[in-house]
Image (spheres, rainbow, N blue to C red):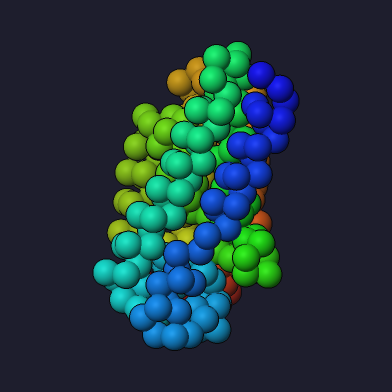
C-alpha cells in the first residue's frame, strides 16, 4: 500500500469531512442565517444552543462527534494491515478536528472542535474518553461554564492515555489536540479571568 493510500487520501478526506459544519447548515435551514453572526460567533454546539435551543444543539453535538468517529474509522479502513494503523487513525482524527475549526467550505471560520474531539477520542481511547467526559460534565455542572468543561476534557484525555500505557506517539498527538483546544478557547480563558465568561 502506498503512502498516498495510507496517509494522504485519508487525511484529506478526514479534513473535508471535518469541514462540514452542522451548526452552520442547521441554522441556515431553520433560521436562514449564518450562526457565526450571532451569539459567540462560533459555529459549534454551544452557540447553537444559544441561537436555536438545546434540542438542535444536541443534534449538532452528536453529528459533530460522529464525523470525528467517521474520520477515525476511515483512517482505520484505509490503513488496512499497516503497522501504523493507530497513528493513521489519530492523524485522521486530528485532520477532522482541524477541518471543524478551520473549514475550507466556510472561509476557515468554524468552531472549537470539542464535539469532534469527543468522537475521535471515543474510538481511539474509549476508557480515557469516558473518564475525561465524566470529569468534564462534573465541572460544567458545578461551574456552569462549558468552556471549562471542554478544556478539562481535552486536558485529561492525554493524561489518561499516558496512564493507560497508550503508544507514546498517540499521547503526543493527543497533546496537540489539547493545545489546539486551548488556542481555540483563548478568549474564553481571558473572559474567565475577567469574570465575563458566559454561563449555561
Q: Nearer the viewer, residue 13 or 157?
A: 13
Q: Is residue 195 left or right of residue 2?
A: left
Instruction: Say which residue appears at 54% left-offset and 51% top-offset.
Output: 17
Residue with the most extreme right position: 3
66 over 129 or under it: above or below:
below
Report the quarter where the C terminus lies: bottom left
Instruction: Say which residue appears at 32% left-offset and 62% top-offset.
Output: 59
Any part of residue 5 in sight: yes
Q: Nearer the viewer, residue 195 or 93?
A: 93
Question: Residue 82 falls in which quadrant of the image?
Answer: top right
Q: Is residue 89 left or right of residue 48?
A: right
Report the quarter where the N terminus lies: top right
Any part of residue 197 in sight: no
Rendering coords of residue 156 (x, y %): 48, 39
Q: Nearer the viewer, residue 93 or 148?
A: 93
Question: Residue 92 falls in which quadrant of the image?
Answer: top right
Rendering coords of residue 72 (x, y %): 50, 36
Rendering coords of residue 114 (x, y %): 49, 53
Instruction: Say which residue appears at 35% left-offset and 67% top-offset.
Output: 57
Amino acid at each position: 500500500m502506498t503512502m498516498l493510500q495510507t496517509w494522504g487520501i485519508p487525511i484529506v478526506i478526514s479534513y473535508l469531512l471535518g469541514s462540514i459544519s452542522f451548526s452552520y447548515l442547521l441554522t441556515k435551514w431553520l433560521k436562514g442565517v449564518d450562526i457565526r453572526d450571532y451569539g459567540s460567533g462560533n459555529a459549534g454546539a454551544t452557540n447553537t444552543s444559544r441561537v436555536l435551543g438545546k434540542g438542535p444543539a444536541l443534534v449538532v453535538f452528536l453529528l459533530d462527534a460522529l464525523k470525528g468517529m467517521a474520520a477515525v474509522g476511515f483512517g482505520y479502513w484505509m490503513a488496512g494491515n499497516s503497522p501504523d494503523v493507530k497513528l493513521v487513525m489519530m492523524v485522521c482524527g486530528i485532520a477532522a478536528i482541524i477541518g471543524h475549526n478551520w473549514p475550507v467550505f466556510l472561509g476557515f471560520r468554524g468552531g472549537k472542535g470539542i464535539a469532534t474531539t469527543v468522537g475521535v477520542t471515543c474510538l481511539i481511547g474509549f476508557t480515557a474518553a469516558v473518564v475525561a467526559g465524566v470529569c468534564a460534565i462534573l465541572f460544567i455542572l458545578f461551574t456552569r461554564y462549558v468552556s471549562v468543561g471542554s478544556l478539562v476534557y481535552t486536558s485529561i484525555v492525554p493524561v489518561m492515555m499516558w496512564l493507560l500505557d497508550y503508544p507514546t506517539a498517540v499521547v503526543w498527538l493527543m497533546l496537540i489536540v489539547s493545545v489546539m483546544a486551548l488556542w481555540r478557547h483563548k478568549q474564553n480563558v481571558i473572559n474567565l479571568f475577567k469574570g465575563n465568561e458566559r454561563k449555561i
